[in-house]
Image (cartoon, rainbow, N blue to C red):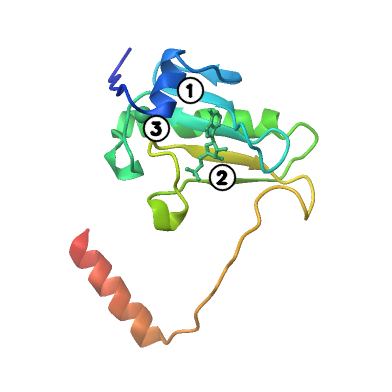
């Protein structure tokens, strides 16, 4: 399996190896997709790389490039009768990551009550502040 790099003590690595059961939806040689055990809505699925990494930026590009087409395919099927959905990917505990193996959530949004609820605390800032931020980011690229 290309680039396979799994660890012994990770829940999702164990799921990939078949040591812990999962409701597998689909897999490729680089990615694995299964149902979330505590769904936010029916069909809530996870796409994970067959490469142990805690953060998205630690996953090799070829594996990342494999994951989104799989997520796209599953998003159409896992929503069942729902055609709207959220794709969510958390990095770090402050960003709500619990399982330290990269995963994309595919969360069907069948109605206003089920699925992902999002807080969106927008800030109002000046164009000058926006440009200062832009300069700082570009220096770090
Ligand atoms: P996150 O907060 O982004 O780390 O989300 C981790 C997700 O993994 C949660 O939605 C859990 O319900 C899900 N999860 C944890 N253990 C399992 C498992 N054994 N099988 C399927 N999903 C799981
Ligand atoms: Zn892992």
Mark 3 Cα shell of 10 Å, populated few (<14), some (14-19), many (≥20): few
Disc nearer the start of the sequence (3/1): 1
Label count reads 3
Give the alpha-carbon distance from disc 1 to disc 2, as whole Å.
Answer: 16 Å
Disc nearer the start of the sequence (1/2): 1
Instruction: Give the number of the mark in front: 3 or 1.
Output: 1
- Check contact, mark 1 vs mark 2: CB within 8 A: no
Q: Pointer 3: what residue?
A: 65
Viewer-proximal residue, 102 or 124?
A: 102
Q: Residue 40 carries which label?
A: none
The residue drawn where x is 44% and y is 84% is: 125
Q: Pointer 2: what residue?
A: 87
Residue 31 on image: x %, y %? 44, 24
Q: Pointer 1: what residue?
A: 32
Residue 87 on image: x %, y %? 56, 45
> Where is residue 73, by image quadrant?
top right
Mark 1 Cα shell of 10 Å, populated few (<14), some (14-19), many (≥20): many
For residue 62, above or below residue 21: below
Residue 39 on image: x %, y %? 66, 38
Viewer-proximal residue, 85 or 15?
A: 15
Q: Seen in the image, is 66 located left or right of residue 61?
A: right
Task: Say which element carries label 1.
Answer: strand
């Amino acid at each position: 399996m290309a680039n396979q790099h799994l660890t012994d003590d990770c829940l999702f690595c164990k799921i990939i190896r078949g040591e812990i059961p999962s409701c597998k939806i689909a897999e490729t040689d680089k990615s694995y997709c299964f149902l979330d055990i505590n769904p936010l809505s029916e069909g809530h699925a996870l796409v994970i790389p067959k490469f142990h990494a805690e953060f998205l930026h630690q996953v090799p590009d070829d594996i990342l490039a494999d994951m989104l087409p799989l997520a796209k395919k599953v998003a159409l099927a896992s929503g069942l009768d729902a055609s709207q959905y959220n794709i969510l990917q958390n990095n770090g505990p402050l960003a709500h990551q619990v399982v330290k193996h990269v995963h994309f959530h595919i969360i069907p949004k069948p109605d206003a009550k089920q699925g992902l609820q999002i807080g969106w605390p927008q800030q109002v800032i000046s164009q000058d502040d926006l440009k200062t931020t832009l300069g700082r980011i570009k220096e770090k690229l």
